[in-house]
């Protein structure tokens, strides 16, 4: 990590933001300002301001005041919610990215992190081991906006030499329930099992998707942000994944761990979204370039979430 970090987080109350805040709070010589369009439900361990990530003036005054040298840009509308209003989704996902990157260039911010997603792949690319680089035709506005921003990273990198680091994330398992994603079923099912409630799953039992445990995501973000990169490496959105999951596999795992959850299957429009995504992704490049190596398999992830 950079010394004397001054960090701005947008969309800080989402699944990634909340976990990153917990991690960054442990670090010395680090100032963190969390921002989000919503207000926190519980008290945070860092400073907080309610800010819309599209509000350039507001963000600029905060950057001037706090002299940030690093930004984590998490503000986004996820895949399932995005389909309710594609125009708003593009606006939030792409234009907030544009706002943050333009401010970073103007104010000489050293490094940015921005998460991409497996949603960049399309229905024609629903393979096992989806390659890092392949032609992509995303099926959702979320995927389209993520792919456009991946292209923008490359473009800005060449044009302004700005250092934006990125991971192409699969579904993330954590205990922070957020909502609006297609992979949310996993977190919801574990929560239901924990609360001894029945669960109605919106995906079919055999739907395979790549997943990862949140601690592995935070570890990957930190590794990626610390690595000394060559110019070639900086502009990648690296595939990473932990394990391949289906709703049925998760149900069976919960039962094995002594949580006899009753799951009903009632697939809705999110089934089509899930089927347009890869079942597993090839993360060799991340392994080769910066030593990516996941620590959590399904059993370990679920155990941690139940404890
Ligand atoms: N977890 C996200 C979603 O389901 C995928 O990046 O929308």
Image: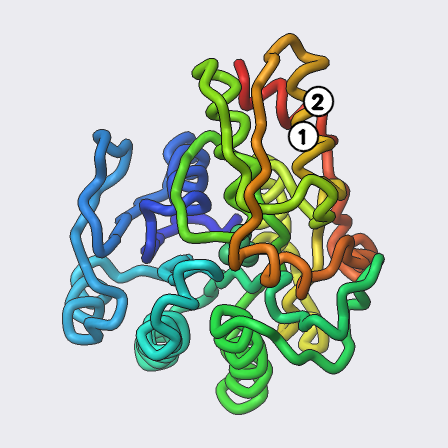
Q: Along the line of sight, which residue is nearer the eye, 191 or 268? A: 268
Residue at 25% x, 72% y is: 54
Q: Is residue 196 above or below residue 127?
A: above
Q: Along the line of sight, which residue is nearer the eye, 239 or 9? A: 239
- Do the residues under discs 1 and 2 have CB atoms within 8 angstroms? yes
| Mark 1 lies on residue | 250
Q: Position of residue 88 (x, y in %)?
A: 31, 74
Q: Is residue 210 above or below residue 110?
A: above
Q: Position of residue 116 (x, y in %)?
A: 56, 64
Residue at 70% x, 71% y is: 123
Residue at 58% x, 82% y is: 151
Density class for disc 1 (Cα within 10 Å; few <14, some 14-19, many ≥20) is some
Does any atom of ligand 1 lie closer than 8 Å to the CB of label 1? no
Residue 187 visible? The answer is yes
Q: Position of residue 25 (x, y in %)?
A: 37, 34
Residue at 66% x, 26% y is: 251
Q: Is residue 193 left or right of residue 300?
A: left
Task: Tell me which colouring the rendered structure shows.
Answer: rainbow
Q: Is residue 4 left or right of residue 291?
A: left
The alpha-carbon separation of the residues under discs 1 and 2 comes to 5 Å
Density class for disc 2 (Cα within 10 Å; few <14, some 14-19, many ≥20) is some
| Mark 2 lies on residue | 253
Does any atom of ligand 1 lie closer than 8 Å to the CB of label 2? no
Residue 70 visible? The answer is no
């Amino acid at each position: 990590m950079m010394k004397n970090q001054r960090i701005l987080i947008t969309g800080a109350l989402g699944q990634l933001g909340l976990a990153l805040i917990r991690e960054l709070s442990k670090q010395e010589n680090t100032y963190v300002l969390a921002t989000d369009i919503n207000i926190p439900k519980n008290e945070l361990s860092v400073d907080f301001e309610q800010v819309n990530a599209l509000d350039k003036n507001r963000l600029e005054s905060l950057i001037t005041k706090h002299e940030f040298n690093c930004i984590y840009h998490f503000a986004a509308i996820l895949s399932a919610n995005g389909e309710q209003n594609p125009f708003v989704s593009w606006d939030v996902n792409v234009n907030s990215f544009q706002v943050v990157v333009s401010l970073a260039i103007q104010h000489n911010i050293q490094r940015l992190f921005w998460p991409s997603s497996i949603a960049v792949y399309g229905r024609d690319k629903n393979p096992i081991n989806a390659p890092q680089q392949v032609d992509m035709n995303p099926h959702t506005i979320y995927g389209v906006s993520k792919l456009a921003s991946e292209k923008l990273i490359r473009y800005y990198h060449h044009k302004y030499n700005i250092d934006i680091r990125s991971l192409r994330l699969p579904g993330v398992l954590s205990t922070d329930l957020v909502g609006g994603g297609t992979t949310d079923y996993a977190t919801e099912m574990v929560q239901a099992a924990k609360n001894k409630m029945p669960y109605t799953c919106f995906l079919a039992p055999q739907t395979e998707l790549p997943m990862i445990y949140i601690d592995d995501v935070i570890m990957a973000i930190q590794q990626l942000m610390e690595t000394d990169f060559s110019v070639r490496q900086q502009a990648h959105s690296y595939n990473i994944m932990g394990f391949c999951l289906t709703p049925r596999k998760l149900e069976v795992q919960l039962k094995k761990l002594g949580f006899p959850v009753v799951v009903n299957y009632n697939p809705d429009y999110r089934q089509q979204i899930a089927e347009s995504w890869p079942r597993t992704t090839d993360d060799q490049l991340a392994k080769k370039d910066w030593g990516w190596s996941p620590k959590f398999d399904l059993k370990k992830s679920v155990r941690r979430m139940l404890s």
